[in-house]
Image (cartoon, rainbow, N blue to C red):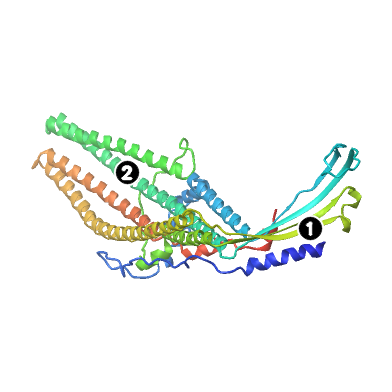
């Protein structure tokens, strides 16, 4: 009996690895119009940014310990990321399910029953004497079935499933990149608000001293009540700005808490002013984005999956071949169930071909081709948006660098103006309105400088995100499930 089953399995297993042709178009990656270089106000050295942006933990280029701790919390507890991990696990399971179709399906259904046959059962017209019969029946059957993949429909389906799995891996990496970039952006925006609040606090302290001075001069008959009112107005307005900025800071702190997967009540980020400069980054070449951006890689893998689905649809035009076999043991006495004389078996094959489907197969092929065309368009659109985002961020960084230089000069000039106005007021040469105006100008310019410094850091984060965060599409090669006999034999 063992020899019989070996004979059953051998042809099926050989056919798994020696099936016929594979219908459908061979996948070729669609070309994308790619610029040769970036057009930015300042030259960027065309090198590989993976040399300067660490793979995975790219945020470490900013050397911010608190940011690194927050990123670690986000990667561990962010719920959006956990959802993406679960979706990837689903894609992996679906790929395993598709691969299982390459192997024969085996089933066993043991049966034990005791039955009584009627004494008046039909005899097919043969006059014989019947009597009631009570008997046992023990069956240990095995069934084997296998659909031969003659024209590659199943192989194309596996190809589509593996491409979808790799698209899922790229999607997971893109979700991780988006979350970590959002965390870094919110963090540096929070630090910008901390800097602006510190500026307002220092300004309030200065204005408070000024108000005391003007009030004393007014009480001594040197200054007018208008001077006191003007200084107090600026002081109260500045305090109001600080109160409103605290509200904005709370909102960003709450957003960071959600990104880190933490409840908002009780979550706090310590106050710290902006420090340091954005890291030096190389944009590389535009063509690098096609390999480094996970969203572009995801769109490319979706295109490959759609191409394979065309082959799946075309395979419906060809006949199918099914091999089957069953065997086992049948006996009325359980002690004789495994005897050679109790063995039963049967083998066979069936072929099927749809003769008329009313255009259903043609419609399925057209549907698959249209799906591929849509995937190509989506791939082109994703790549074009990638080029735009990098160009925007490169231009933004260049402009913000120039703006920082001129704004620092503006702040220095505003400070000199405050000193001069204060000296002239003390000497009785100008009214206190000149001092108030100079103080307002200084406050406005210091806030603008803090905003520019924060925007530079946020734009650096966005540039790293636009460059793919140090990721590389070659990592998708590991997101593959190879068919093995061991897999097929797993329960």
Mark 1, Cα crowd under 10 Å, few <14 / some 14-19 / many 20+, is some
Residue 27 in the figure: left or right of residue 90? left
Residue at horizontal 37 percent and vertical 70 percent from the top? 47
Q: Secondary structure at mark 2?
A: helix
Query: Closer to the camera, 23 or 403?
Result: 23
Residue 226 falls in which quadrant of the image?
top left
Location of residue 19 (image quadrant): bottom right
| Residue furthest left in the image | 429
Q: Which mark is residue 198?
A: 2
Q: Say which of 465 and 360 sits in front.
A: 360
CB-based contact (under 8 Å), mark 1 and mark 2: no
Q: CA distance from mark 1 to mark 2?
A: 87 Å
Task: From the viewer's perspective, tell me whether residue 42 is left or right of residue 457.
Answer: left
Can residue 491 be seen by looking at this rendering? yes
Choose between 93 and 317: the one closer to the eye.
Answer: 317
Side of 60 relative to 480 (left or right): left
- Mark 1 or mark 2, whichever is nearer to me: 1
Of mark 1 and mark 2, the one earlier in the sequence is 2
Crowd around label 2: few <14 · some 14–19 · many ≥20 (10 Å): some
- Counting every numbered tag in the picture gives 2
For label 1, the residue is 345
Q: Where in the figure is residue 240, as x and y percent of width and height?
A: 27, 34
Residue found at x 45% / y 45%: 259
Residue 40 on image: x %, y %: 27, 64
Residue at image location 23% in from the left, 44% down from the top: 443
> Residue 360, percent across and down?
48, 54
- At 38% from the left and 42% from the top, the residue drawn is 252
């Amino acid at each position: 009996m063992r020899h019989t089953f070996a004979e059953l399995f051998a042809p099926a297993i050989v056919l798994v690895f020696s099936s016929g042709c594979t219908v459908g178009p061979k996948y070729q990656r669609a070309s994308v119009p790619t610029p040769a270089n970036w057009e930015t106000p300042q030259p960027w050295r065309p090198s590989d940014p993976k040399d300067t942006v660490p793979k995975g933990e790219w945020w470490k280029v900013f050397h911010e310990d608190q940011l690194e701790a927050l990123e670690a919390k986000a990667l561990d507890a962010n719920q959006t990321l956990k959802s993406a991990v679960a979706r990837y696990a689903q894609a992996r399971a679906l790929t395993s399910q598709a691969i299982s179709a390459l192997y024969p399906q085996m089933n066993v259904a043991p049966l034990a029953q005791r039955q009584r046959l009627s004494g008046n059962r039909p005899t097919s017209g043969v006059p014989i004497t019947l009597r009631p019969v009570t008997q046992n029946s023990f069956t240990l059957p095995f069934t084997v079935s296998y659909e031969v993949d003659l024209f590659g429909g199943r192989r194309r389906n596996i190809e589509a499933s593996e491409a979808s799995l790799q698209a899922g891996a790229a999607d997971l990496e893109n979700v991780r990149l988006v979350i970590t970039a959002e965390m870094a952006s919110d963090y540096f925006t929070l630090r910008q608000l901390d800097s602006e609040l510190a500026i307002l606090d220092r300004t309030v302290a200065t204005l408070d001293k000024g108000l005391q001075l003007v009030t004393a001069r007014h009480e001594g008959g040197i200054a007018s009540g208008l001077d006191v009112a003007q200084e107090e107005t600026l002081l109260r307005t500045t305090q109001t700005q600080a109160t409103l900025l605290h509200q904005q800071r709370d909102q960003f702190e709450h957003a960071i808490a959600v990104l880190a997967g933490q409840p908002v009540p009780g979550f706090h980020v310590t106050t710290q002013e902006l420090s340091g400069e954005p890291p030096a980054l190389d944009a590389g070449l535009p063509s690098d984005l096609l390999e480094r951006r996970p969203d572009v890689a995801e769109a490319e893998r979706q295109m490959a999956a759609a191409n394979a689905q065309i082959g799946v649809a075309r395979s419906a035009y060809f006949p199918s071949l099914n091999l089957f076999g069953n065997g086992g043991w049948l006996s009325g006495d359980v002690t004789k169930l495994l005897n050679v004389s109790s063995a039963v078996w049967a083998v066979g094959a069936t072929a099927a071909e749809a003769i008329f489907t009313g255009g259903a197969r043609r419609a399925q092929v057209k549907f698959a081709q249209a799906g591929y065309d849509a995937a190509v368009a989506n791939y082109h659109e994703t790549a074009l948006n990638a080029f735009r985002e990098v160009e925007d961020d490169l231009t933004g960084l260049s402009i913000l660098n120039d703006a920082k230089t001129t704004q620092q000069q503006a702040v220095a000039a505003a400070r000199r103006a405050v000193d001069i106005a204060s000296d002239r007021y003390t000497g009785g040469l100008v009214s206190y309105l000149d001092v108030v105006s100079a103080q307002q100008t200084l406050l406005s310019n210091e806030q603008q400088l803090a905003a520019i410094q924060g925007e530079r850091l946020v734009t650096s984060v966005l540039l790293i995100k636009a460059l793919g965060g140090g990721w590389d599409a070659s990592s998708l090669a590991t997101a593959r499930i190879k068919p093995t006999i061991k897999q097929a034999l797993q329960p």
